Amino acid sequence: MSVERILYPCYFDVTLQRREGRRVPKNLGVKSPELPAIEAVLRKMKVPHRLEEHHHPARWAEREGRIVTEWEGSKEDLIRRVAKSLGGRK
């Protein structure tokens, strides 16, 4: 059974501190991640998803949107897999 997992672009932004919303190590982050790039990675991984106009609560003024996925594993596992495919190393 799949569980909905929400991904925000700020999770992958290497320019942000952890307290500002980054959820990946700096070596896996990218500069200014955008929803289309994250969506392309999810499509390649064959993960069902949809885009939404909602924004990260701590970064509501940024209006960056979010992606809701159907994922069976842990959210951290999904975030790391996406980060590695976005252009991070290791």
Image (spheres, rainbow, N blue to C red):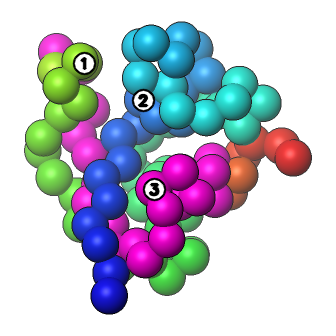
Q: Which residue is mark 2?
A: 10
Q: Is residue 82 visible?
A: no
Going by the numbered disc 1, the residue's amino acid type is: Arg
Residue 27 drawn in magenta? no
Q: Quadrant of residue 27?
A: top right
In this rendered view, identify the residue nearer to me: 81 or 32: 81
What residue is shown at x 12% (from left), y 41% (from top)? 54
Q: CA distance from mark 2 to mark 3?
A: 15 Å
User: Residue 60: image x %, image y %?
Assistant: 16, 21
Q: N-terminal of the two: label 2 or label 3?
A: 2
Highlighted magenta segment, given as a residue range: 61-83
User: Residue 43: image x %, image y %?
Assistant: 47, 74
Q: Is residue 26 visible?
A: yes
Q: Would you say the residues marked 1 and 2 are in contact, meaning their CB atoms lie under 8 Å apart? A: yes
Name the outermost residue toward the right: 90
Mark 2 is surrounded, within 10 Å at the Cα level, by few (under 14), some (14 to 19) or many (20 or more) other residues, namely many
Going by the numbered disc 2, the residue's amino acid type is: Cys
Q: Quadrant of residue 62?
A: top left
Residue 63 drawn in magenta? yes
Q: Which residue is mark 1?
A: 59
Q: CA distance from mark 1 to mark 3?
A: 20 Å
Going by the numbered disc 3, the residue's amino acid type is: Lys
User: Residue 3: image x %, image y %?
Assistant: 29, 72
Q: Would you say the residues marked 1 and 3 are in contact, meaning their CB atoms lie under 8 Å apart? A: no
